[in-house]
Amino acid sequence: GALSGVLLFPLLAFVAVVLFLRHAQELRRADPKVFRRSFTPLAEWVCRDLNELPHLFRRRMARAEATAESFLRSGWHSPAFDRALRFLRYVCGSLLAALIAVAFVDDKPLYFIEIFG
C-alpha cells in the first residue's frame, strides 16, 4: 500500500509526459491540410450570391482561399514583430510555469495576489 502511494505521482507524471510526447509527434507529422484556414459557415453564407449554384460557389470559394493563403504567407508582418511575439510567448510561458510550480509547492500564496492594488 505505501509503495503504491509513493510510486503513484512519478508514474502519473511519466504517463502524462509520454502521452504528451506521443501526440506532439503525431501533430508534427500531421498533414498540413488539417491546419489549413477555411471560411466559417457564416462567412460562406455572407459571401454566397443569391441563387448561386453550389459547384460555382465552391469553385469561387476555393479561389478565394488560395488568394487569402497567399496573402497571409506574403510576409505582411516584419521580423521584428515576429521576435516580439516570440518574446511575449516566452515571458507568458515562463510566468505560467512559475505559477504552476508555486501551486504544486504551496497554493496559499496564490490566493492573496493583488494586481493593480
Image (spheres, rainbow, N blue to C red):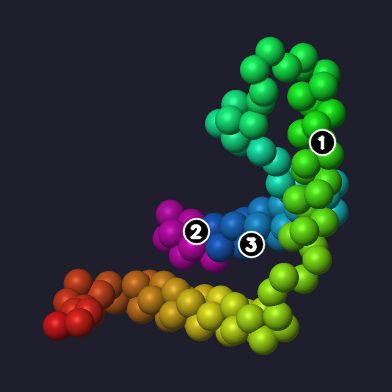
Whether residue 3 appears in this view of the structure is no
Task: Find residue 8 and name its label.
Answer: 2
Callout 2: helix, strand or loop? helix
Q: CA distance from mark 1 to mark 2?
A: 52 Å
Quadrant in the picture for residue 96: bottom left
Q: Residue at left 78%, top 41%? A: 64
The residue labelled by disc 3 is 17
Task: Find out whether the residues at labels 3 and 2 contact each other: C-beta distance under 8 Å.
Answer: no
As helix, strand or loop, the secondary structure at mark 1 comes to helix
Residue displayed at 77% across by 14% down: 53
Circles 1, 3 touching at the beta carbon (< 8 Å): no
Q: Give the residue pinned by disc 1.
A: 62
The span shown in magenta is 1-10
Q: Main secondary structure of the magenta part?
A: helix
What amino acid is labelled 1 in the image?
Answer: Ala
Question: Mark 1 or mark 3: which is in front?
Answer: 1
Outermost residue on the left side: it is 117
Residue 95 occupies which quadrant of the picture?
Answer: bottom left
Mark 1 closeness class: few <14, some 14–19, many ≥20 residues within 10 Å? some
Q: Amino acid at mark 3?
A: Val
Q: Is residue 45 left or right of residue 72?
A: left
- Disc 2 marks which amino acid? Leu
At 83% across and 46% down in the image, what residue appears? 66
Do residues under tags 1 and 2 come within 8 Å of each other at their CB atoms?
A: no
Q: Position of residue 85 (x, y in %)?
A: 59, 78
Q: Quadrant of the N terminus?
A: bottom left
**What numbered label is drawn on residue 11?**
none
- Judged from the image, the secondary structure of the residue bearing numbered disc 3 is helix
Q: Label 3: how many residues lie within 10 Å, few (<14), some (14-19) or many (20+)? A: few
Which label sits in the foreground, 1 or 2?
Answer: 1
How many circles with numbers are drawn on the protein? 3
| Residue 45 included in the magenta stretch of the image | no
